[in-house]
Amino acid sequence: MKRLAGKAALVTGASQGIGLGIALRLAEEGADIALNVLQDNAAAAETQARIAALGVRCLVLPFDVTDLPAMRAAVERAVQGLGALHILVNNAGIEKRAPFLEVAEQDYDRVMAVNLKGAFFLAQAFAAHRQAAGQGGRIINISSVHENLPFPNFAPYCLSKGGMRMMMRNLAIELAPLGITVNNIAPGAIETPINARLMNDPALKEPLLARIPQGRLGKPADVAGVAAFLASDDADYVTATTTVVDGGLLWNYAEQ
């Protein structure tokens, strides 16, 4: 028996990287998937086909997580199409590189809107659905080691992830009476498109690898395995926590 059989999950930012890895892993565990992407294009169709090939249902939901009416409508579509939503994975995220003195207002607003505001209101819509259903659920936020670790030239990104840490803790307390657990996963350096510059530049990659005790970058599957656990009944008593997935980077890191 697959441990997520009979469940349905909404995964945001699932067209690539960690989001794609999580969507595929939850599907392997038996969950139907509502796949959020920005655009319903050929790549989304390919991902939908990969998930359907695992023997589960998959809906593609194109919407921007900062567009609250579109987001709320998509949650309703997912519930109608899959019968319910039991798991929410807030994965969508962006970063903008700039020294603090050069951060543009529009870039600050966009990072905060995608990384924090979108996750907050998706969690609200999801929790309202679970309350109406009279059943518990799982909220899993994909945060970052930078919810704790400063990252020079990425101040808005760090602010958004620090905010996600406190959001997770607060929502975990408020939603516990509804049987909804809320947890963060904090990846370190993972092989994803957002880290393409890092992966393709030995001058950046090699010093970082020297600071990771396991000596390698993480893979989306490393994060997806933790997400599958948190989504399952095995994690029923786990809430208000951040699980760090970083090969030991966080406590062995120093700026050069």
Image: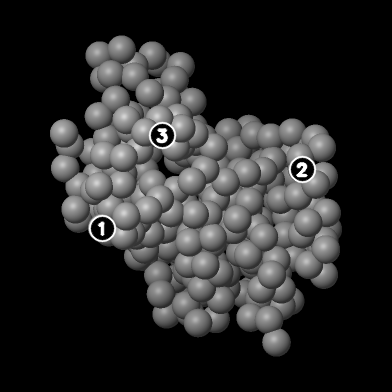
170 lies above or below 31? above
Percent of width and height locating residue 206: 31, 40
SS of the residue under disc 3:
helix
Question: Which residue was labeled with disc 3?
Answer: 198
Crowd class of label 2 (few under 14; some 14 to 19; many from 20; radius 10 Å): many
Q: Give me the C-alpha separation between circle 1 and circle 3.
A: 18 Å
Residue 182 falls in which quadrant of the image? bottom left
Residue 88 falls in which quadrant of the image? bottom right
Q: Give me the C-alpha separation between circle 1 and circle 2.
A: 36 Å
Camera-nearest residue between 8 and 22? 22
Question: Which residue was labeled with disc 2?
Answer: 44
Q: Which quadrant would the C terminus be assigned to in this image? A: top left
- Does the residue at mark 1 contact the one at mark 3 (Cβ under 8 Å)? no
Q: Earlier in the sequence, mark 1 or mark 3?
A: 3
Residue 156 falls in which quadrant of the image? top left
Question: Which residue was labeled with disc 1?
Answer: 213
Mark number for residue 160? none
- Residue 124: in sight, yes or no? no
13 lies above or below 109? below
As shown in the figure, which amino acid type bears the numbered disc 2?
A: Ala
SS of the residue under disc 1:
loop
SS of the residue under disc 2:
helix
Crowd class of label 3 (few under 14; some 14 to 19; many from 20; radius 10 Å): some
Q: Earlier in the sequence, mark 2 or mark 3?
A: 2
Percent of width and height locating residue 161: 36, 43
Camera-nearest residue between 249 and 231? 249
Q: Give me the C-alpha separation between circle 2 and circle 3.
A: 26 Å
As shown in the figure, which amino acid type bears the numbered disc 3?
A: Leu
- Residue 2: in sight, yes or no? yes
* Residue depicted at 55% across the width and 50% down the height: 18
- Does the residue at mark 2 contact the one at mark 3 (Cβ under 8 Å)? no
